[in-house]
Image (spheres, grey):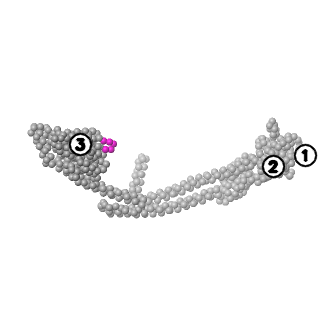
């Protein structure tokens, strides 16, 4: 049912298209399809290209945020390695291992000098210098294992007190990391602290807890850690705790707007659309929130898309105009072609078309002119073939009813009757009747079997006349009997052999008719031991061009004439076929008849 519906719909569409003129096809089929194609292109660009571009930009932005997060983590990794020079120095280890409560003034003074030198003097270590000279370390503090603030670079008592409170508050969290860095944002003082637990550096006593290290950092460390970024960029940054508290806002948005964006992940503000991409940081409970301005991020993509759509629209207009112009040019050439054909009423040079154009119409012109020339040649060939066939039929009929031929035949029959050989006489009369009937009424193209039957009737009559002096062998494979051959092809050749062979009345005449075939042709051989044919006549017949009118009388042949047979065969099948005459090794003639391998039923009369 479904196939039937589709077939019906297809037929209706084909019938509709067949009813259109070229102009209608252009404007009812080509233009709508063209416009539809451009609409699909625009839709594809809008969806596929823009979607792909958005994905690419989003991926690049996410990678940039991840790089900033890696910078932050790497920033504090370097601080972690820089503090190794304090907590694992021999003096620090020795003083903390004393575990004196409270520390002696000398120990306090010595560690104070160490911290001072660490913060304010250059070192041979790039890692230490990076943090102590180029970056904002505000204060350094050490607490021993007993919980006393061993020493600090802080100058205010409130800061010392707050540092001691944080040591007590965060000690468990810090020691749980076993020497790893712990980053903490102090909401009360609005300060960032970096903590580490100090352990014995002796391999045998690495689990011995010696104290805590605290570094208070300037808040600008957040901006320094992520590096420079333009304020006009589509991406800005904000450091937030996992609880949602704004620690450092490096964006143009207010803290409240950043808070809302962190909670909802999206924000619309002043006609700009924002969304957040957050990355958890390695140290502490911090999140680096990338604030992405979608309006700025995709502005270039939308602008490029608008330009593409404008270009597509312009191209639609230009192509539409080009199609209309092309239609007018093509339609004009078709009209010129049609007018020329309509005005042609006869074949000849006047009917040829000369449009003086290049390209397809030049090819069409050449094909049309070649067709006219071919038609003219075929018409002439058909006319010549018809004339040759008629001439052959008339000549054959004349030969058969020739009084001398009939007299000899009837005289032989009379002799048979006188000798009371009634059966031979009757057979002779039947053969003569079949012979005359075939010559007059048979089709132009007959089967090889019928042609051989005609030959046998002819030979039966001739053997009455020549008796045992005429010996004929016909050996043709049965599988070749159904192939087609023009009527009156073999008999005239055999007749020619008999006429020339019996010039010497005492000579015995031998004739052999054989046949073979290949993939495309049937080849018949007629050999005799007659007097042969002159080289001049053989050359003329073998190289006959049927388009040139040659007089058969020039061949010197009786009856239909070899030239006539050659002309008929080549007009029928082309110059690759026909007869080829050769001389036998000793005497006589060998004639080859080559015809295409076609069944008699496939040939038109």
Q: Is residue 423 magenta?
A: no
The 10 Å Cα crowd at callout 1, few under 14, some 14 to 19, many 20 or more, is few
Question: How far from the left and from the top, in percent, is residue 339?
Answer: 35, 63
Question: How far from the left and from the top, in percent, is residue 286?
Answer: 73, 48
Please give the residue where the numbered disc 2 appears in the rendered image.
Answer: 123
Q: Which residues are magenta?
A: 517-521
Question: How far from the left and from the top, in percent, is residue 470?
Answer: 18, 40
Q: Main secondary structure of the magenta part?
A: loop
The answer to whether residue 343 is above or below residue 110 is below
Q: Are marks 2 and 1 in contact (CB under 8 Å)?
A: no
Give residue 365's quadrant in the image.
bottom left
> Closer to the camera, 249 or 268?
249
Please give the residue where the numbered disc 1 appears in the rendered image.
Answer: 105
Q: Residue at x 73, y 48 (%)?
A: 74
- Res 587 label: 3
The CA span between labels 3 and 2 is: 126 Å
Q: Secondary structure at mark 2?
A: loop
Please report whichever mark, 3 or 1, sits nearer to the chain's N-terminal start.
1
The 10 Å Cα crowd at callout 2, few under 14, some 14 to 19, many 20 or more, is some
List the single residue furthest toward the top.
204
Q: Which of label 3 and label 2 is nearer to you?
A: 3
Please report whichever mark, 3 or 2, sits nearer to the chain's N-terminal start.
2
The 10 Å Cα crowd at callout 3, few under 14, some 14 to 19, many 20 or more, is few
Q: Which of label 2 and label 1 is nearer to you?
A: 2
């Amino acid at each position: 049912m479904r196939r039937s519906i589709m077939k019906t719909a297809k037929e209706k569409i084909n019938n509709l298209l067949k009813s259109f003129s070229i102009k209608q096809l252009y404007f009812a089929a080509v233009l709508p399809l063209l416009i539809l194609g451009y609409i699909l292109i625009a839709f594809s660009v809008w969806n596929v290209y823009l979607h792909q571009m958005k994905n690419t930009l989003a991926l690049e932005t996410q990678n940039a945020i991840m790089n900033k997060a890696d910078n932050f983590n790497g920033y504090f990794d370097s601080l972690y390695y820089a503090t190794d020079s304090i907590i694992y120095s021999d003096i620090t280890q020795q003083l903390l291992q004393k575990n004196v409560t409270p520390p002696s003034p000398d120990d306090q003074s010595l560690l104070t000098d160490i911290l001072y030198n660490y913060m304010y003097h250059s070192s041979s270590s790039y890692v230490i210098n990076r943090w102590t000279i180029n970056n904002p370390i505000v204060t350094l503090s050490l607490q021993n294992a007993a919980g006393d603030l061993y020493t600090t670079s802080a100058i205010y008592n409130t800061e010392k007190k707050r540092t001691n409170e944080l040591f007590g508050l965060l000690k468990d969290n810090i020691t749980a990391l076993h020497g790893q860095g712990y980053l903490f944002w102090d909401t009360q003082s609005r300060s960032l602290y970096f903590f580490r637990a100090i352990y014995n550096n002796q391999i045998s006593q690495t689990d011995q807890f010696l104290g805590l290290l605290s570094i208070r950092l300037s808040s600008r460390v957040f901006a320094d850690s992520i590096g420079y970024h333009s304020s006009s960029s589509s991406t800005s940054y904000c450091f937030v705790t996992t609880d949602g508290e704004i620690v450092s806002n490096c964006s143009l948005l207010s803290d409240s707007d950043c808070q809302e964006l962190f909670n909802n992940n999206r924000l619309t503000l002043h006609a700009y659309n924002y969304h957040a991409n957050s990355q958890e940081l390695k140290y502490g409970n911090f999140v680096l929130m990338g604030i992405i301005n979608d309006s700025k991020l995709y502005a270039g993509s939308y602008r490029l898309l608008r330009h593409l759509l404008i270009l597509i629209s312009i191209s639609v207009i230009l192509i539409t105009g080009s199609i209309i112009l092309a239609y007018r040019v093509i339609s004009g050439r078709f009209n010129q072609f049609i007018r020329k054909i309509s005005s042609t009423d006869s074949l000849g040079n006047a009917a040829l078309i000369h449009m003086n154009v290049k390209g397809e119409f030049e090819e069409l012109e050449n094909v049309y002119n070649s067709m006219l020339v071919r038609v003219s040649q075929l018409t002439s060939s058909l006319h010549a073939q018809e004339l040759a066939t008629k001439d052959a039929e008339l000549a054959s009929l004349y030969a058969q009813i020739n009084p001398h031929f009939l007299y000899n035949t009837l005289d032989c029959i009379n002799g048979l009757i006188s000798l009371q050989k009634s059966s031979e006489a009757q057979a002779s009369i039947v053969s003569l009747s079949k012979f005359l009937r075939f010559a007059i009424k048979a089709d132009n193209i007959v089967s090889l079997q019928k042609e051989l039957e005609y030959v046998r009737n002819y030979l039966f009559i001739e053997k009455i006349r020549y008796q045992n002096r005429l010996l004929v062998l016909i050996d043709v494979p049965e599988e070749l009997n159904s192939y087609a051959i023009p009527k009156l092809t073999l008999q005239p050749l055999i007749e020619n052999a008999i006429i020339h062979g019996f010039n010497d009345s005492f000579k015995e005449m031998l004739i052999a008719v054989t046949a073979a075939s290949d993939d495309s042709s049937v080849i018949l051989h007629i050999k005799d031991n007659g007097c042969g044919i002159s080289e001049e006549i053989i050359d003329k017949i073998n190289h006959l061009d049927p388009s040139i009118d040659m007089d058969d009388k020039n061949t010197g042949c009786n009856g239909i004439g070899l030239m006539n047979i050659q002309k008929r065969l080549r007009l029928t099948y082309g110059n690759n076929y026909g007869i080829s005459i050769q001389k036998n090794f000793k005497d006589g003639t060998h004639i080859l008849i080559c015809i295409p391998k076609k069944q008699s039923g496939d040939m038109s009369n």
